[in-house]
Amino acid sequence: MADHSVEITEGCRLPVLRKNQVNEDEWPLAEILSVKDIQGKKLYYVHYIDFNKRLDEWVTPDRLDIKKLQFPKKEAKTPMKDGLPGSRPSSPERDVKRKAESVSLATQVTAATPVPSLPSSAEASQASVYPAMRDSSFSIKSRDEHEPLTSLTTNGTTSIQRHLIPPQPGRKRKSCGGTDEMVKMFQNNSPRCSTIYLLPGEDSQDSSDGIPSAPRMTGSLVSDRSHDDIVTRMKNIDCIELGRHRLKPWYFSPYPQELTSLLILYLCEFCLKYLKSLKCLQRHLTKCNLRHPPGNEIYRKGTISFFEIDGRKNKAYSQNLCLLAKCFLDHKTLYYDTDPFLFYVMTEYDSKGFHIVGYFSKEKESTEDYNVACILTLPPYQRRGYGKLLIEFSYELSKVEGKTGTPEKPLSDLGLLSYRSYWSQTILEILMDLKSENGERPQITINEISEITSVKKEDVISTLQYLNLINYYKGQYILTLSEDIVEGHERAMQKRHLRIDPKCLHFTPKDWSKRGKW
Amino acid sequence: MSKLSFRARALDALKPLPVFRCEDLPDLHEYASINRTVPQMPTGMEKDEESEHHLQRAISAHHVYGEKRDNMVIPVPEAKSNITYYDSLYPGDFKMPKQLIHIQPFSLDTEQPDYDLDSEDEAFVNKLKKKLEVEALQFEEMIDRLEKGSGQQLVTLQEAKLLLKEDDDLIREVFEYWSRKRKLCKNVSLIPNIKQEKRDGSSTNDPYVAFRRRTEKMQTRKNRKNDEASYEKMLKLRRDLSRAVTILEMIKKREKSKRELLHLTLEVVEKRNAMPDFGSEVMAEALAMAKPVYKIPIIPFSSSSQYRHQDHIDFKDYKTRPEKIEVVRTKRKYEKKPKITPLSAPLHTVPSLFNPKDLNQYDFPSSDDEPFSQIHSGSSEAEEENEPDGAFAFRRKAGCVYHAPRLDQSGDWPWSGDTEGGSCDPRFRYSLTTLTIPRRCVGLARRRLGRGGRFLLDRAYSDLNGVFQSLDTDSEPDFSFPASPLHLQTTSQTVPSSSSSQSSSSSSSHTTYSDLRHILQNIKACRWRHFKPRTLTSQSGAGDVLSRRAFRGLMRGGAGLGGRTLGPPAVAFTAEQYQQHQEQLALMQKQQLEQIQQQANDTGSSQSLVSKTVDSVSAQFAASALMTSDQLLTLKVKEDGVGGGVNGVVQASGVYKGLSISATSSSQPTLTAAPPTFLSSTSNSNTSSAHTVHIPIGNHGNNTANSTSQVLIGNNLRLSVTTPSIGSLNARHLPRSLSNVPPTALKLTASNCQLPKVNTGENHEQEKQSLNSIAENTVAMEVT
């Protein structure tokens, strides 16, 4: 199929064969992100549209359905100047800077896709407002297929324009009102955004000067501009060996470039140092005497322990941990050093030592009530309740601190599901335990829930909404617990045997605002 | 739609929400449509991802089934946990400690090489082992050092030998192996490292660059106070450090020149040895040829004499403060020393002034005999105990050549005669001198022109002194002061000083008067070479100050020599005094200008009369004030005086130590001249309170100010003046001058007040300065 005369280049779209979880053949539409030639055999790096990037992969030509090939449109160079949402940005500076071999056709394709007339559907409105966050060409399609847009879209757009029109640099770092997402987007991705949404005549301002703008300094999940780079859109490590596990990375991670060509990248299980060969690992292990993360153990119950690592004091480990975590976190940025973060590493003990299961990082001082920056359960431990344990632990820390907290945004798909699940269970636990006093209905305020759980108020509300518990009844809001919810919750709680025991936590929060302690 | 016609209230987080079971509310569905009014919360995901297929499927699955189904889970790339050799890699003997693990800071810093041997290296090492003794770890260490030793350029073999401790053969082998391997690998380093950011900022977008430094400051808003304080501390630290650097550089310079000196000496010795000059004749010859020419710094010789004759340093200067020196030594208060130690005061010397301390300022006791540094450091206490002369003992000064006195030639001073090699300037001859106030002849004296045009009178003794005293009979009737006993008494005590300040008695107010008188005097003086001192410019109040100035350090030994002019005039001027003088000169000039202005406005005669009365009043005033101070008092001066309404009260909580202020006759003229100064200082303190008014005469000055002023003085001294209804006379012209006095003129700096130097002649100097003094002055005055 591939030896047709047509050349499949980056940016082309076509159905690609992949097996789904139940091992059935699927032909989802995919975009070619990169092509490489190994001993005369071509390999294509494909991104399945509407699938998470972690499923992107190198495929052989025989998995491509050439007959349905869509070429990228050439006129895509002109971005949508009318400020309409939905056009994939093709900011000139990116195209210029992009390396020759990775001509960004992806962007061109998208821009070329005919812009649908303002669609209308409530659910997708947000999606269409922020189509350009990354490789979002598919968002158009998705909109067409499932979720037409509402008039909200326009609202969103205009509000964005309003924010963007004064192109003050200082503005970018401040939140200018609006939803979290918008704020975040402007803070981090202003160059890109401006290219998309700028009014006619203004589009060249950010892109033409070519002055690279650094991402904001706080937080850890922000995608910087390099995120846009085609390089970062492709996995660069094939396989990582960590202890007894072999992990297939999901995303790009900036390990030393010379190590990306390895078939297997070896990590020391305890210090997480990267090594190019098993021999090196063996040699390293003769010198490395760590058997646990190099920090203070602040929690231990059974075999589960938590270690606290200061990103400033233990740079080597923190960086190694971040590099590993980046393999599984799309939005994590390693742009800046680890100094302002604490890392809480969850381990499981056996006779070989304390094995890392997962971790979360946390800003020492968060201006936005974040109690978690990045959070990850390593793939071998996923879907076994460890994620929830990590989340629970993060809220236990917040309880000790006497604060409410929320995870840094954006959440990943798995992050959203985990957090929602945790929030739901935590809140339902409280609601079900409410006893009616002197015969009246039990009642509780949102703030009370927030205080008990350390879950930020907004998250409480969103969870209540998500669970459909808030109802308006006879002039007031009430919380209703349906039978389904109650049963589902009871079932879920039975399965949840991994819990944090606050009594085992030995943690005194530090006042990081006192600079000397850094 | 009817249900939507009303708006639901916004969800209130503070409002209790009743919790219902759905089965209890059968009619709930009827209200369901209103639920939409609750604002939709964002999920927190990026929107494009939110729409991803698997997530949506998982979410909907959750909605449908209430829990996750396995096939509805978001798929992720697989992970395997079946590494067979795992158990052999990691030892399985780790025991969980009973206690929570606590990491000691820095315990993690092990000195292990970062480089890890790979298979290729292993083969090489094994091969090498046959020839040389080498271990894998040792090899790793060597490579590690080579890698870390090379930046852009590789380490050379020579450098490698310096870097590595091993023996040469091994180094050569490993080096060759390493450089070969390094060339083959295209990477920056054999130790894989995360890409660092480049300084030029070109790496901003390089996706492989990670962990950049945060260049921007983190938010400091929360602890702004803290930041300011620490900022100041940092500034101070920086200043101190830079000072240390300066000192170190000076030391370096000094040691360099010492080394140079050593080399030169060595050279000389070698040369002499080669010559051979064992009898040091050649040396002597050479020395004679290269006789160093020391230039006496060009300043009035009265002050330079101090440096040429250090052993003669005016004894009185020290006499007044011996206990102070003691105190300082025992306390060893480093910062205070510069102020109080006799010789270290002029840290801020006038540049033109040559000062021995400048030479020694950066010297340290490490060097040979350096008298000043010893005094500075106080390190030679024990030594001093052995020397009866203490601080006044003669010490050789580095860089000075001391010659034996030449008896055949007494000097080439301008006043010595031809026989002595002098120019025999008539100005320096002793002649009969008459003082204008009191009207009497003081005998033989000679006049010298001091700095700033002041006159110094050197008196000489002669047998005819008694005759001379009687010579001066002519009187000037209209120039009389009310004779108070005090006045007389003090006058007799301090003849030389009063004589000169008398000359200045022609203060601003009676200009026309004194002009005439001086012309007369001049005529007389010319006739019989009878000198009667006079002021330079009769109009100015500056004159008296200047002339009074001239008395500082006036040598009191000269009179005993009976007309012989052999000895150098032992007039001691210290650097501080000079500086002080400069400052006062500036002030005087200002005042002079003001007074000229005044005179332009006022009619001469009435003015003069008025001021004269004031003069007498103020004289008494001052005298009484001084008397009280004389008794070592906590001052409480109540003055009524002729002026009547003067209610000046000085309250001093402290005691004036060692300040023996005696009212001299010369204080009288001072007073007339003083008011402008006083006033201005007072007014200034009224407004800014930066300046402090001080001691008795301050009170005096305040009287002239027609306002109530309360002045806080640096050290516990409080001076409060209540409405002087008098002042009138002075006040008439003084306010005008007030406005003209620029603040700079008021700032007679701290150094002005050098208490230890107080002698009778300087008393009013002291007093006056103290008026203008700032807080530091009070320190110098030792008001405690």
Image (cartoon, coloured by chain):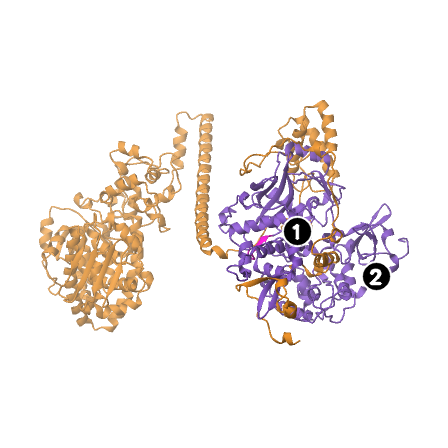
Chain colours: A purple, B orange
Q: Which residue is mark 1?
A: A492
Q: Position of residue A118 (x, y in %)?
A: 73, 71
Write the residue at 44% across / 47% down: B237
Q: Is residue B417 left or right of residue A398?
A: left
- Disc 2 from disc 1: Cα separation: 48 Å
Q: Which residue is mark 2?
A: A71
Depth check: B471 or B250 in front? B250
Q: Is residue B270 above or below residue B622?
A: above
Q: Is residue B291 above or below residue B279?
A: below
Give, as a three-letter code, the residue at label 2. Phe
- Mark 1 neighbour class, 10 Å CA radius: few under 14, some 14 to 19, many 20 or more: some
Q: Is residue B270 above or below residue A364?
A: above
Disc 2 or disc 1, which is closer to the eye? Answer: 1
Q: Identify the magenta region.
A: A366-372
Q: Secondary structure at mark 1?
A: helix
Give, as a three-letter code, the residue at label 1. Ala
Q: Secondary structure at mark 2?
A: loop
Write the residue at 60% across / 59% down: A459
